Structures are given as C-alpha cells and as structure tokens.
Amino acid sequence: MYQFVGNFKGKIDSEDTQKICKVVPKKKGYIKNIYENKFLELDDVSKYIISIGSSKFNKLSHVMNNNPIICIEHSIDIITEKSNHGFVIHSDKDGPVAGKCFTIIYYYKVQNIKNNKLSFYEIKDLYKKKGDYYNLIDEFEPQEGDMIVFDGDVLHCPSDYEIENKTSSSIREILVFFISL
C-alpha cells in the first residue's frame, strides 16, 4: 500500500523546502504550485528527498540511471475551520506525469491540525448504481516531518482535516514528488 520512509523533522531544513516551488501562502485557504523537471536538473534538497524515498521503494537505480521526469507539487493549506482541498479518491497515474509513476509525500509542516489522514482504498464495486464504490483499506496519520512513498496506481485521498485549537494558527504544507517510471 504505502511505505513509511521515516520522520525527517529537523533533518531537512523547512526554509529549503519552501524554496522548491516558490509558493506564496495566502492568509487562508489552499494553494499549490506544480512544476516539472528531470531528476538531474533539480535542486539538492529535492534530489535528497527523492533519493531517500525511492531507495525505500527499491526505485533508486531507476531514478539514478534514467533521469526520469519528476513533477513536484508544493501545497500550502492555511486552515481557518476545515480544509477545503477539493480532492476526491484518485490515483496518481492520472496526475501530472500522466502515466506509470510512484509518489513520495513529505509532510514538512503540520501544525495544530486534527483528523489529518491520508486514506487508501480499493475498488469494491465499480458498477454499483448508488452508494460506496470503494473499500477503505488503510490510513496514514502524518506528523510533521513524515515521509511516505507509494505506487501511482494506489487509490487514495486526504481527509478533511480541521483546526485542533481555534486560538492558534493551523497550517499543513507538503511536497509531493510524482516520479515517472
């Protein structure tokens, strides 16, 4: 399903991660920026994250030998009540690299959020006329600094996370690397 790579809080500088896609946060709401490049043209922090994640997923030789196309998504969600990211259950093979891929997610800032999960699914009944088409098969509840990796065919969706303490600011910042195969 997914593999937990590790927690890198304090090991990867959050100021460096913010420079990767140069997203300017709004006062509230969800914003993202996506750009595409080849592995060898990326900055050192992106290469480090991709190397760690792809090594855990046994894809490091693919990355080093093939210099694949990589799409990087930098998402910032400044939450005032409940998230409004607009995601539905999906797989990443239909995403920015448009084809076979694997995904690395680095949760580099998670502050004052509850119900922050990434849920994984399988198709239950594609031809059912009404009701639920998917079975929930696993959930990952990321903490600040966590990194995971999974195949682009895997169905998943982030939860509608919420503010834990309404007197403090809440933010969720992630880097998502879509690595073509």
Image: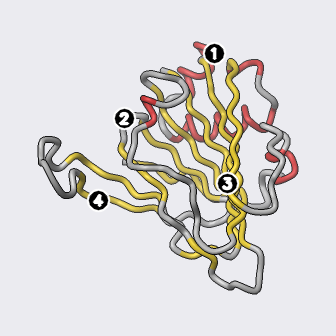
Mark 3 → mark 1, Cα distance in angstroms: 31 Å
> Which residue is labeled 3 in the image?
30
Q: Which disc number belongs to residue 171?
A: none
- What amino acid type should be assigned to the residue bearing mark 2? Asp
Q: Position of residue 27 (x, y in %)?
A: 81, 62
Residue 54 to residue 157: above or below: above
The residue that disc 1 covers is 67
- Spatial separation of the CA atoms under disc 2 and disc 4: 15 Å
Residue type at tag 4: Leu
Among numbered discs 2 and 3, the one appearing first in the sequence: 3
How far apart are the two marked residues, 1 and 2, measured between alpha carbons? 21 Å
Kindly check if marks 1 and 2 are in contact, taking CB atoms under 8 A apart as contact: no
Q: What amino acid is found at the position of numbered circle 3 in the picture?
A: Tyr
Which element carries disc 1, helix, strand or loop? loop
Query: Which picture quadrant has residue 22?
Result: top right
* Res. 153 mark: 2
Question: Where's residue 153, x and y in %?
Answer: 36, 35
Bin the neighbour count of mark 3 within 10 Å (Cα to Cα): few under 14, some 14-19, many 20 and up: some
